[in-house]
Image (tube, rainbow, N blue to C red):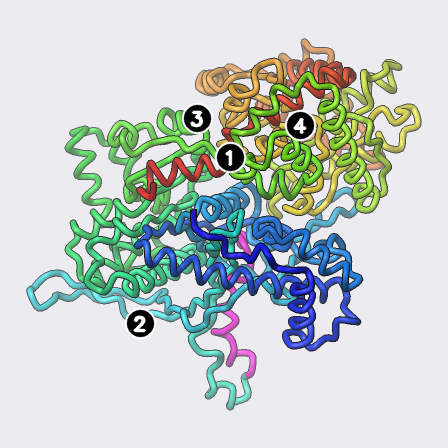
Amino acid sequence: MSPKITNPELKRSDFVERIRYNARYGMGIGDDQLTNQEAFEATARSLREKLIDGMLETEARYARQGSKRLYYLSMEFLMGRALGNGLYNLGLLEVCRGALTDMGIDLEEIRQAEPDAALGNGGLGRLAACFLDSLATLGLAGYGYGLLYEFGLFRQEIRNGYQKEKPDHWNALRSPWLIERPEEACIVPIYGRIENGVDSDGGYNPMWLDWQVLVGVPSDLPIPGYGGHTVNFLRLYSAHSSQDFDMQIFNEGDYLRAVEQKISSETISKILYPADTVQSGKELRLLQEYFLVACTLRDIFRRYKKEHGTHAIAELSTKVAIQLNDTHPALTVAELMRTLVDEEHFEWDAAWEQTQATLGYTNHTLLPEALEKWSVSLFEKVLPRHLQIIYEINRRFLEQVETRWPGDTKKLAWMSIIEEGETKFVRMANLAIIGSHSVNGVAKLHSDLVTTNLVPDFYALWPEKFNNKTNGVTPRRWLLKANPGLAGLLSETIGEGWITDLDQLRGLEPYIDDSSFRARFLDVKLNNKRLLSDAVWVTNRVRIDPLALFDIQIKRMHEYKRQLLNLLHIVYLYLIIVEDGKQLPTPRVCIFAGKAAPGYWAAKQIIKLINNVAQRINNDPRVHDQLKVVFIPDYRVSLAERIIPAADLSEQISTAGMEASGTGNMKLAMNGALTIGTLDGANIEILEEVGNDNIYIFGLRTEDILDMRKHNSYRPEEYYLHSDRVKRVMDAIKGELFCPGEPGLFEWIFNALVHEGDYYFHLADFNTYSDAQALAAEDFSQPLLWSRKAILNVARMGKFSSDRTIREYAQDIWGML
């Protein structure tokens, strides 16, 4: 293993001096008057010095070793806060804590001053962040490439129960972690037209003319691996105009028009996922995706030529691997071909061979409607040369299809990159599959469904391309950092090896029947629940009992994730308490958190219903604190780090066959929560690891749902008519119980579930879900039984480390191990 790049002898007095120096000379502030925000920045600058040393040493090592490089392209990187993570990974936590104490500053207080880096939306971006941590911890030359969004997603506020979106200007104070690299800026052409021509040999030589120019300026975010042996980076591009303003127009007095191009250009990296319901939003999203791809490839070629020389491009795939995280970067296929053919003067076949050998594509969705496609007319306007290249890729590909299945016009139409019709579209998933040598899903079930349901014809053509890489999460952030109490107990009991080898958690199993260990395990959980209870009081002004069962559902708001099913069960519990006079086996606190896309009306209405139900239950004296409901606003990584260690029950209740993998299920189980879930995504593999007695599985199977959809045989109204529980709950939702003074507010839910097909099978699964919930509550009321199950869940989470996932990618796809 490489030598540590951090100095284990670094003294707290040295760290004090660095903080003082950075406050005075980097910020112009004396250290006797630092606010928490200023103290955070001075501390971050001091840690950044170590990270930069590490980055430079790491890059020099890779160059000496001739390491193959991996470039991970993603529209999202949900990084969270960096200070605590950096201190843990560099082994400087206690040194820093002591240094700040000597200065009269509390480390925990200044950690709260750091904003979450708002560069992602949900699981896609957080997975990418976990992967970067594992790449660095494993010492692999892997880099993330994304966009430096000025506003990221949005800040969520709840007003009168409704979600309200506020801009999240997370980088308003200029992140101290980012290292701007203006000297490595690149030029990106867009728009323009194609002029047909020939080269000196009479071959076809199209010219892309009259294009406009964007400038991509990179900033690097250091990514330290655990132990400080490797520091990689995440490179983020911001868009700038090629000229700040038109001086002639400025001199004529039209000041706004003078900066028009600058404003238009810089919009490209302004916000994550602009609304694509209007044409201008679609155009901006396509520009964003191309801007990311073009900047990344220019940087890859620059770095490659610097290291290997300008004549070594023919061997690109031996030294470079590019992974496409979902379809957003699928334009890499066309841009890499354009670069090789137009700029590096490759013959088409040689360029195609390099492109396929270099690219890998990860699919993250089973919903055909969620696979990106862009209108040909928009493509022609924004990227005319790329559209030409895509047509040529498609022509050659369809010749292969015709050879394999002569005369099968349906297959030709289905597999074509171009979707024919009144409006023609470019199918980005088809482009990614055709242009990559590897296509992977992210859980066993998901990968099976990709090949059997989503793209079976592609699998029939190229079965060797398709593989599974079950997702994982980094135990450094989600256990070591998020849950220091449990991490300390684990290290004291089985040693610290689990931090980089999560399979070592199996060493906990002999302690399951150790009463002393169980008691300490439960004490850690109770303390985490107290911390969350305090946080809930601050955000929601609701008192919750740490001794109650903490039932947690934290994830993006979407109908297929079925927050509504959870809520229907909560309503059922409320009704049996207040109408039937029943006592619950144990008090229960139901906690929700998650954001709905601004244009997703149904998801936003479900947030409103959650808050209305909470208002009713939390203020009804008949409940006697047996049941509480809380929706914590503005879900983000730092909030997840507070909630997850406190969870008792983990809600993973998506409609079977619709969740690709999920990673929240792994984080929660890793922290000692028991899963209640369907046989969907990675839940199936968690079941395989922990055993049927240590998880609560319910509901229809994927094959049941697919069969009912195929034959149109699901009749939700039958469940309403023949199940007293279902009827009782749905009638309560339909009435005014949870919308006093607003009759009919939630009647749409009743209609959608009872009369309009219940697309996500809430009513079909309600009774088995309620039964599983009752069993979980009964088990929780027996601390000895529950603690045994919880410890087993922690002990058997080794498979779900992102270190294992990255090793599999590196070995099977990237050729790096």
- Mark 1, residue position: 501
Viewer-proximal residue among 189 and 169 = 169
- Mark 3, residue position: 444
Assess whether mark 4 and mark 2 are in contact (beta carbons under 8 angstroms): no
Q: Secondary structure at mark 2?
A: loop
The type of residue carrying mark 1 is Asp
Q: Residues within 10 Å of mark 2 (few under 14, many from 20)?
A: few
1 or 3: mark nearer the eye: 1
Viewer-proximal residue among 249 and 481 = 481
Assess whether mark 2 and mark 1 are in contact (beta carbons under 8 angstroms): no
Q: Position of residue 672 (x, y in %)?
A: 66, 28
Q: Residue at x 68, y 57 (%)?
A: 96
Whether the magenta-drawn stretch holds residue 267 is answered as yes
Placement of 732 over or under 221, stated as above or below:
above
Magenta residues (range): 255-275
Spatial distance from mark 1 to mark 2, Cα to Cα?
A: 55 Å
Spatial distance from mark 1 to mark 3, Cα to Cα?
A: 22 Å
Residue lying furthest left in this view?
Answer: 201
Left of 805 or right of it: where is 315? left
Q: Residues within 10 Å of mark 4 (few under 14, many from 20)?
A: many
On residue 210, the disc is 2
Residue lying furthest top in this view?
Answer: 722
- Mark 4, residue position: 673
Of callouts 3 and 4, which one flags the residue occurring earlier in the amino acid sequence? 3
Q: Secondary structure at mark 3?
A: helix
Q: Secondary structure at mark 4?
A: loop
Whether the magenta-drawn stretch holds residue 588 is answered as no
